[in-house]
Amino acid sequence: MGVRLGTARFTAVNADPSRNGANLGKPALTNLNAHLAAVMTRRLIQILAATALIGAAHAQSAAEPESVGDRFNRNNAPQGVQLGPWKVTPTATLRGGYDDNITTVSENQSASTLVQLRGRLDVTNGEGQNFVNAYAEVDHTWYTDVDGLDHLNARGGAAFQVAASDHVTLRGSLGVATEEAADSADEGIIVAGSFDPYADLAKYLAVPASLGVTFDGGRYVFGGSADLLYTDYDPRLTAGGVTVDQAFRNGTNIDLKARAGYRFTPGTGVFAEGQYNIQSYDDEAANSTGWRAVAGVEFEASRLITGEIFAGYAAQSYDAGTEVTGLTYGASVDWFATELMSFSLDAKREFGAEQTEILLGLPITTAVTRDNVRLGLEYEPLRQVLVRAEGGWRQVDYDGQDRTDEGVFAGLGIDYAISPAFQVNMDYRYDQTTSEVAGDTERNVFMLGLTTGY
């Protein structure tokens, strides 16, 4: 079961993708599959989620419902080494596979077999409502048939949670990541009236931080949080040889949230949430401030269906003079259908900005609205076998332009736990995007790997 932070829900399994293969389970993916996600913004949010809630399973009540994937990972996790109050768990993963469109472009695709090696170290102290956790992870990907795309990623972070009193809980996190990843198919820029896709991987530094407090009086619940994300991207190279500065997304994004809720019964209630964000980038045209006001319900039906659904209104105002307003929504629902099968639904709408064109030598930044819907399935036919499947839809609407990009994706994964120390993982993912401007793209990735831990 996940840990709720504002209106977002993150699951402990996502904190350790190396224990779940390509981790097509809810809601995150491994590094490679994250490259296949709709937009890079989503990937950065996943980094923040993994940093903030590593080891969150320690905070989970034993009475809470547990997804099939969470139970499988808990039952088949390495034992780790106990050093006083600290538990140290090293893991390593070796994977090989094939990617038929590494940079996700509509023409002149780069295809190659690949090898990926990952090492990870988790350190935990405490359980229940009080814990301190840290992790460090490094992975390297080699492409056998393509030059210039091999890359090394590194990330790490620490998180804490403490019960300050019977009703007040404090939490915080700090992380850092340096990565190279493929953007979505709509990433590129219009030069001289023609779309010119990026031909390289996006290389960036991300530093997420979070601090939050929750008062839970049983019937009344109040909370607040502050999230910060600093990003710094290297310039990108297009297929046409144009170097594009990424100033429109180099900077800081700050989100402040406040939430109040009332429970009719344990697990069932209503809530209202307000959010204010400040986006400050090197490209001042991309600077913006925004707000969001939503109301929703959280529910728990016979402990088989849990989650929350909300809707409201949001506005994002850009220094360049553009303003995007409209309906916003979100949903996060889990259905524990049987002891061996569980389903998940995640949906959300976000506002952002992209640099879409170079006109007379000057970049043009456009406001965008992003919609994402994802369905997930976890099935455990045998105690040592986990089957994962997912499918979803996404849309990016460009304000002031006759452009709307749409995409669908699907994935299938199988984990076989030979023992707590060894696990075999197989993953396949299909990604398709339709765009009248960027062109239509398809991508298929197959991976097979072995994870070992101590």
Image (tube, helix red, strand yellow):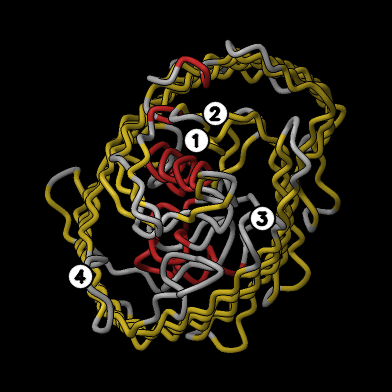
The answer to the question of whether label 2 and label 1 lie on touching residues, with beta carbons closer than 8 A, is yes
Q: Earlier in the sequence, mark 4 or mark 1?
A: 1
Query: On the rendered image, what quadrant is the C terminus found in?
Result: bottom left
Give the residue pinned by disc 4.
454
Looking at the picture, tell me which residue is in the foreground, 354 or 231.
Answer: 354
Mark 4: which secondary structure? loop
Left or right: where 116 falls relative to 256: left
Q: Tag 2: residue type?
A: Ile
Give the residue pinned by disc 3.
65
Rounded to the nearest whole Å, what is the CA distance between mark 3 and mark 1? Answer: 51 Å
Q: Tag 3: residue type?
A: Pro
Mark 3: which secondary structure? loop
Give the residue pinned by disc 1.
358
The location of residue 416, given as percent across then percent down, is 44, 86
Mark 2: which secondary structure? strand
Give the residue pinned by disc 2.
364
